[in-house]
Amino acid sequence: MEIVYRNFIRLLSIGSFNQEESVEPMSVFKWKQLLMLADTYEVTENISYGIIKTDKKTDYLVPKGIIEIANQNISGKSTDFTYKKTRYNYAHKYENRFANVFLNHRLKKLIYNEVHSIDTSIASLVFLDKTIENINAIISSGINFKDIIDIGLYLRKNGDKIDFIKYEQWINSLGIKNASNAIGSYLITLFCFELDELPYMKNYRKQTFNMACKPLKYTLTQAAKDNHKESYEQRIAKKLHLPNSKILSHFSFFPLEVSSKFIAGIYKSLSNIEE
């Protein structure tokens, strides 16, 4: 099934960032598996646009039925993908981004100081916010392709407005440098970003591609067993209100926040039992 994972990543890169990638021929069955993955990870339009663009360059590579499905998926929709334009109002009410109180306090102070500085960089704050969104998603449920694409699109559009010196100071202060580097590694390995687009990174994880393929493999395996998108652990956790122990696998990724989230999960579980 590795060919399905490779083509999934390549089509995401083509569809989201207009990268030049070589897609490998597959059977109709495997193309349908790829489309199922796209639906599961909520990147159907990105994948579909990648399929349409690939078909225009290489005749007969994609089965006709798959092309028809892809056209239906993007019918009437813009194929000019852009980042999620959330309205960040840093000068007013602050919303907690972390489970850890100490980190929230530090982030709140960081934002306040930046908003009131003489050279405020809102683009840098937005990039930091998107980084934290990605980190939280990865801790909770593993790689979120949609969020990784979102931060990549923002970086491509606003990279020249981001103060990477400030950004590096912030991620060091919050203890998220390793986590931020992991996100950068996904952008480089999966979507062909260059190191100079991420000046705060000194190196990147070469095993990132295999890490990204793990959830894809798990999804297809589970689908073959019970045709259900949720993992067994998630379904049991919902039934029994158990804390999600899988987040501990990300302990080295972001120790302080992972510990806080796990403890918060235990507290919530105990509260549910009391009820």
Image (tube, helix red, strand yellow):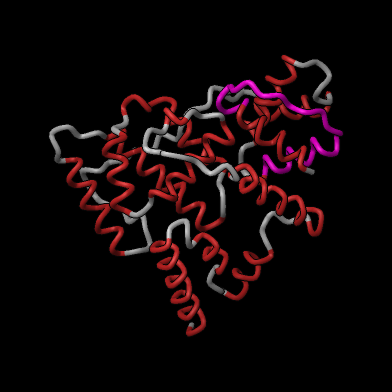
Relative image position of residue 68 (x, y in whole percent): 78, 25
Q: Could you tell whether 172 is left or right of 227 in the image?
A: left
Q: Tell me where residue 261 appears, x and y as whole percent.
A: 44, 66
Q: Left of 221 or right of it: where is 117?
A: left
**With respect to residue 223, does 273 lie above or below?**
below
Residue found at x 56% / y 73%: 241
Q: Residue furthest front?
A: 203
Residue 143 falls within the magenta-colored stretch: no
Which image quadrant is residue 6 in? top right
User: Is residue 28 a member of the stretch shown in magenta?
Assistant: yes
| Helix, strand or loop: magenta stretch | helix
- The answer to whether 259 appears left or right of 242 in the picture is left
Please give the count of numbered marks on the rendered protein: 0
Name the quarter where the N terminus is drawn. top right
Q: Which residues are magenta?
A: 14-39
Give the camera-side residue of 165 and 110: 165
Q: Residue 105: x, y in percent?
A: 25, 59
In the picture as drawn, the residue positioned furthest to the bottom comes out as 274
The residue depicted at 53 percent of the width and 63 percent of the height is 247
Residue 51 can be seen, yes or no: yes
